[in-house]
Image (cartoon, helix red, strand yellow):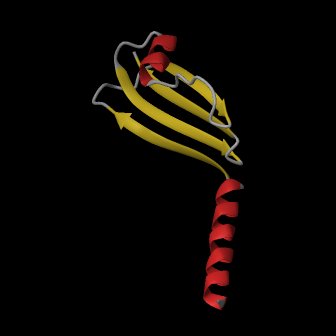
C-alpha cells in the first residue's frame, strides 16, 4: 500500500511540474553555404490553450523580407505555463 501511495504522489508531482513550467527555446535550425545576407525576415504566431492559427514557416519569414536565397534559419519557442505558446522563425539571406 505504501509504495502505491508514493507512486501516485510522484506521478502527481511530475504532472503538476509539467503544467507549471515556463521556458524559451532558441535554436538554429539550418544553415546553407550561401553567405549571410543583409536581409532578415521573421514570421511568428501564438497559441492560447493550443488554439490558434500559426504560420511561423520558413517560407513566410523569407517572404516577409523579400529573401530568395536563404543563409540561416533560427527557431524560437516561448512557453508560459503551457497556456501561451509563441513560435518565431527568423531567416537571413539575400
Nearest the eye: 76 or 11:
11
Name the quarter where the N terminus is drawn.
bottom right
User: Measuring 51% from the left and 19% from the top, which residue is drawn there?
Assistant: 41
Q: Is residue 17 above or below residue 28?
A: below
Query: Farthest left residue?
Result: 33
Percent position of residue 40, x then y: 51, 21
User: Measuring 63% from the left and 41% from the top, which residue is drawn there?
Assistant: 78
User: Measuring 64% from the left and 58% from the top, which residue is drawn there?
Assistant: 18
Q: Is residue 12 above or below residue 7?
A: above
Q: Is residue 59 above or below residue 24?
A: above
Nearest the eye: 7 or 76:
7
Percent position of residue 8, x then y: 65, 75
Percent position of residue 33, x then y: 27, 30
Percent position of residue 15, x then y: 65, 62
Q: Quadrant of residue 72?
A: top left
Q: Quadrant of residue 76?
A: top right
Nearest the eye: 47 or 43:
47
Amino acid at each position: 500500500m505504501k509504495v502505491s501511495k508514493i507512486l501516485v504522489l510522484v506521478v502527481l508531482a511530475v504532472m503538476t511540474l509539467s503544467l507549471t513550467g515556463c521556458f524559451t527555446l532558441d535554436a538554429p535550425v539550418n544553415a546553407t553555404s550561401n553567405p549571410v545576407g543583409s536581409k532578415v525576415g521573421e514570421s511568428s504566431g501564438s497559441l492560447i490553450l493550443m488554439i490558434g492559427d500559426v504560420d511561423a514557416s520558413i517560407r513566410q519569414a523569407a517572404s516577409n523580407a523579400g529573401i530568395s536565397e536563404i543563409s540561416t534559419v533560427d527557431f524560437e519557442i516561448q512557453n508560459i505555463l503551457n497556456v501561451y505558446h509563441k513560435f518565431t522563425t527568423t531567416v537571413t539571406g539575400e
